[in-house]
Amino acid sequence: MTAPIRVVIADDHAFARYGIRALLEGDPTITVVAEASTGKQAVQQVLECHPDVIVMDVRMPDGDGIWATREIQRVRPQTKVLVHSSFEQDPNVMAAMRAGACGFLVKDDDETQLPRAIHAAASGAWIVSLSDTARMRPWFDQLATARRENAFPQLTPREREILNILAMPRQTTRSTANRLGISTKRVVNAINDIKTKLGVTEHDDLITMARQAGLGTHT
């Protein structure tokens, strides 16, 4: 049986956290492992509990949701950040996506969207739920570019270049080395360093993570 999706709820309003928890606890495929009321607490809970997804408010004290999203993507990029806010202003959407969030939901939307969005986020999908999605279409290419350019800030430029090539279809360690004009050993050493920094051990998991972040589509 598949393990439940582990979720942290980050919101500075206790009533909001209670409502989200009550909603999610009705879904046996999701388990809430922790709550946070500030940005710094959100980052700490991610480090301690290793959730699959964090439901993140934007406006919180002691480090807002945008800062917390960026920090979580730096220290534990395996955790997907789903921004959940009352504020629908476009700058918040773009800021969240640039910080590394995989989705944005408005709190006033149909509450049944949240569990579905959590499942989608855990699988690596993007979620943008706004009352007027048509006006967001010109932004989607910008979001994809921003997400790719800001992925894995803990990597050096050379490591990101190697990971980007590896994430392309039909690329191997040898072909990556040939493409960059370096030895295969240097690529292998770089891959080991990348795995250590991103907290993964399996090559397939590394490639999946890279592709979910938008790498592997451009040279």
Image: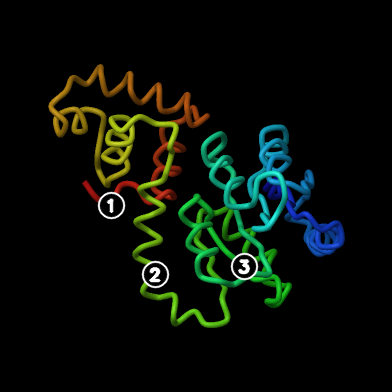
Residue 90 or residue 144, whichever sits in front: 90
Give residue 123's position: percent from left, percent from top.
55, 54
Left or right: residue 118 versus residue 152 is right
Q: Residue drawn 47% across and 24% down?
A: 196
| Disc 3/disc 1 C-alpha distance (Å) | 27 Å
Assess disc 3: are there few (<14), some (14-19) or many (≥20) residues with their C-alpha within 10 Å of its C-alpha: many
Circle 1: element type:
loop
Quadrant housing residue 23: bottom right
Quadrant housing residue 139: bottom left
Check disc 2 and report the residue beneath it: 139
Give residue 30's position: percent from left, percent from top.
74, 54
Quadrant housing residue 171: top left
Residue 179 or residue 128, whichever sits in front: 128
Give residue 215's position: percent from left, percent from top.
34, 47
Query: Type of residue at label 3?
Result: Leu
Check disc 3 and report the residue beneath it: 105
Q: Residue drawn 22% across and 21% down?
A: 184
Residue 193 or residue 3, whichever sits in front: 193
Left or right: residue 180 versus residue 152 is left
Circle 2: element type:
helix
Check disc 1 and report the residue beneath it: 217
Q: Nearer the viewer, mark 3 or mark 1?
A: 3
Vertical placement of 202 versus 152: above or below?
above
Query: Type of residue at label 2?
Result: Trp
Vertical placement of 1 versus 88: above or below?
above
| Disc 2/disc 1 C-alpha distance (Å) | 18 Å
Query: Type of residue at label 1?
Result: Thr
Q: Nearer the viewer, mark 2 or mark 1?
A: 2
Residue 201 or residue 218, whichever sits in front: 218
